Amino acid sequence: MANPPAGETPAATLFENVRIFDGKSETLSPAMNVLVRGNTIETISKDPIEVEKGASTTVIAGDGRTLMPGLIDAHWHAMLIRPDPAQAINGDAGYNNIVAGDEAKDTLLRGFTTVRDLGGPVFGLKRAIDEGVISGPRIYPSGAMITVTSGHGDFRQLSELPRKLGGTLSRMEQLGGSMVTDSPDEVRVRVREQLMQGASQIKLTAGGGVSSPFSPIDVVTFTDAELRAAVEATTNWGTYVCAHAFTTAAVRMSIAAGVTCIEHGFLMDEDTVKLIAEKGIWLSLQPLPEELRTGFPVGSIQRIKADKVWPGISRTYEFAKKYKVKTAWGTDVLFSHALAKRQGAILASLKRWYTPAEALIMATGTNAKLLEMSGERNPYPGKLGVIEQGAFADLLLVDGNPLENIDLVADPDKNFVVIMKDGKIYKNSL
């Protein structure tokens, strides 16, 4: 379906004769039957499941295909996929919301039933999806990225300086893309504002970034007191801080301040990876595609920074495997509709370091465990990322065995024959 309706929740959906990848095991089950009622999985049985087959029940003949949990992207930017930076900051907000809604539908039809959004004005989009106004994945929102003057996420122009404390917010801040904070007190205010709007976790940028024009990679941005203020305010709300950090210094300062999830970390040393493992901290990694690096113009400051970061990607994955770090998977696609279409292919690229089963467990059951860290701020309390009795019915029926051939997830149009989220069927090409 190019543009499916939201669909109505049937009284029941019965998947017959499917082999299950449950989001935890490295092998498929024998032939099973799965009954979904409402928005949860009610019964999983090798024996036939008797239901009243009629208007109130949708029966799907699996014919030995693979039933697996919906995919989870742990580092997504739903509002920042299709526009370029200029459009995202200076363009019409109504237009940006409409194209983000269209992209959300496409995200769901790629098999991604849940995303953890790590920066952007996404609260309205999430509400529209949750209310069934438009189709899209479940969204765990961070709201605006918390940054500092010249930090990653500060996309202001030099003409907007000097910043007047207590003055008018920049356009970037007015939209809710990122918030500039330059003291512990200001950090607390901006963090609490995101939590007030419904943030399930807080994202701050503890070190320099590639895409921001005035944020050198080697710079540690926040002070220790500012980091601790963010952690304190977030912990008081029962959730956690995830910190964008590439370098050893930025990662270690974040850990010392109480941050429990590091994003990227591609320039940290081996001892720091060992520290992450010892402390049980999450490491959210992304197998950033080469096209993202080469998309920056040669000679641009962004390309120079990308050339420094990219060699560290493989090394960090190898360290994470070596020390058995709690590793999440995401894409971190920004400002590229073309790359967003390759979301599944970016997941499949994990085969450089992992077996197909290891990669798919990371993108389902493991990522779901990271989402549970939101505690009482979890917008979707319940079991995600697994196929088990009582779990949310976020399901994909795959034509083939992705545990043998993970490249199947790279072509969802062809290989995902049924896509279900929250018990609703959004695609059924059988």
Image (cartoon, rainbow, N blue to C red):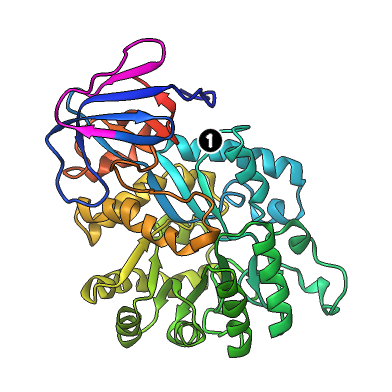
The quarter of the displayed image where residue 353 is located: bottom left
Magenta range is 43-62
- Left or right: 214, with 271 as reference point: right
The quarter of the displayed image where residue 225 is located: bottom right
Q: Position of residue 405 (x, y in %)?
A: 20, 42
The quarter of the displayed image where residue 289 is located: bottom left
The three-letter code of the residue at mark 1 reads Lys
Residue furthest out toward the top: 54
Q: Can residue 149 be seen here?
A: no
**Rendered-image quadrant of the C terminus:** top left
- Left or right: 92, with 260 as reference point: right
- Left or right: 310, with 98 as reference point: left
Against 399, residue 316 (above or below) is below
Q: Tell me the residue at 88%/73% (across/down).
A: 167
Q: What kind of element bears circle 1?
A: helix
> Which secondary structure dominates the residues rendered in magenta?
loop
Q: Which residue bears the numbered disc 1?
A: 105
Assess whether residue 60 is covered by the magenta stretch: yes
**Rendered-image quadrant of the N terminus:** top left
Q: Residues within 10 Å of mark 1 (few under 14, many from 20)?
A: many
Q: Position of residue 284 (x, y in %)?
A: 40, 66
302 or 108: which is nearer to us?
108
